Amino acid sequence: MRPTMKDVASAAGVALKTVSRVVNGEPGVHPATAERVRAAIERLGYSRNESAAVLRRGRTATVGLVIEDVADPFYSGLSRAVEDVVIEHGCLLLSGSSSEEPLRERELVETFCARRVDGLIVVPAGEDHSYLRPELEAGTPVVFADRPPGAGIELDTVLADNLGGAGEAIRHLMGHGHRRIAFLGDDPGIFTAAERLNGYRQALGGLFDQRLVSMRPPSLEGVRADLARMFALDDPPSALFTGNGRYTVTALRALAGRRMALVGFDDFELADLLTPGVSVVAQDPAWMGRVAAELLFRRLRGDAGPPEHIELPVRLIARGSGELPPPG
């Protein structure tokens, strides 16, 4: 059995209230008595029951986080930053991956809410978030990260500048002489993929060619087939823009050493060590996670202001691949 506060009181020869004051750092205990209590705590190996303490305050000191995939470097970086902020506030993080499945997202959120988490940070997989209304009405704060909630729900949201970043990538390639620029992106039903497609389309203007666009979940076979189809055109692409880090890595494998101008959205490990280095539009997942978590704790402290919509800037990192000229 774990030692209790009563055991400490008995060992130190003091009242239970005295032990409580020492444990909670409250005044009113003689220094010699407090030292005797602390010695009994150390001797018995007593530790405070934080769960009971937070429950008495009406909170569970837990936060729920739903991301797409913990194995994705972007989301692992976001998750770690959220966890750091949660720990700084003396709380525990519960997290799970939705695998881009709306039903799985809802199940995770409802499971966390059943455990009475104090707040939620959600990277949404679906567009219907009406299931959150009971929790919102009960006062549970929710912050959306990376993607906004579905229509009809106004909540705090932290995004990256997806549209602007994609446009910057295309203008960079055009500035190096490219006019035929292909785009490989994820499922267009995903907010970030759709925004990056819009940025690509807007930057190209009248040069936009639907034949140079492929939007579907990345696979090596699929990317190889898409590139083969595009290269077989009478006017094939001379440059490539990839919509996320997984697509960039897959495209590099599919190109198999073929020299082609390339800019990818999202930085990734070892991108600077390839030859040439891979030019990217980099967003900061750790920054996004920290901003989302700090916003959540502001709400937990009582900030009842209107929902905030924060868009974090991105930056283009030129490493060589995006600066290659067109062939010929």
Image (spheres, grey):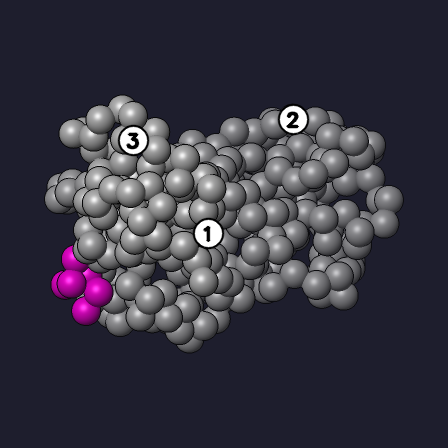
Quadrant in the picture for the N terminus? bottom left
Horizontally, residue 5 falls left or right of residue 29, namely right
Circle 3 residues within 10 Å: few <14, some 14–19, many ≥20: many
Which amino acid, mark 3?
Answer: Ala
Determine the residue located farthest toward the right in the rendered image: 257
- Can residue 183 be spotted in the picture? no
Where residue 219 sits, quadrant-wise, is: bottom right
Q: Which of the marked residues, 3 or 2, is nearer the chain's N terminus?
A: 3
Q: Answer left or right for 68 relative to 191.
A: right
Q: Does the magenta segment cover residue 14?
A: no
The residue to which callout 2 is attached is 318
Q: Nearer the viewer, residue 301 or 31?
A: 31
Asked if marks 3 and 1 touch (Cβ < 8 Å), the reply is no
Q: Which residues are magenta?
A: 134-139
Going by the numbered disc 1, the residue's amino acid type is Thr
In the rendered structure, are the residues bearing label 3 and label 2 in contact, judged by CB atoms less than 8 Å apart? Answer: no
Return the disc, 1 or 2, that comes first in the chain's sequence. 1
Which mark, by number, is residue 192? 1
Horizontal side of residue 104 vs 305, given as left or right: right
Q: Is residue 288 above or below residue 244?
A: above
Where residue 34 sits in the image (x, y, percent)?
29, 31
Q: Secondary structure at mark 3?
A: helix
**Is 137 contained in the magenta span?**
yes
User: Is 129 situated above or below 277?
Assistant: below
Give percent across and percent down for residue 235.
72, 50
User: Residues under labels 3 and 2: Cα distance?
Assistant: 61 Å
Give the residue number, with chain letter if any, for mark 3. Answer: 34
What x and y, as percent, mark residue 213?
Answer: 60, 56
**Mark 1 vs mark 2, CA separation in Å:** 22 Å
Residue kind at label 2, given as amino acid type: Ala
Quadrant in the picture for residue 220: bottom right
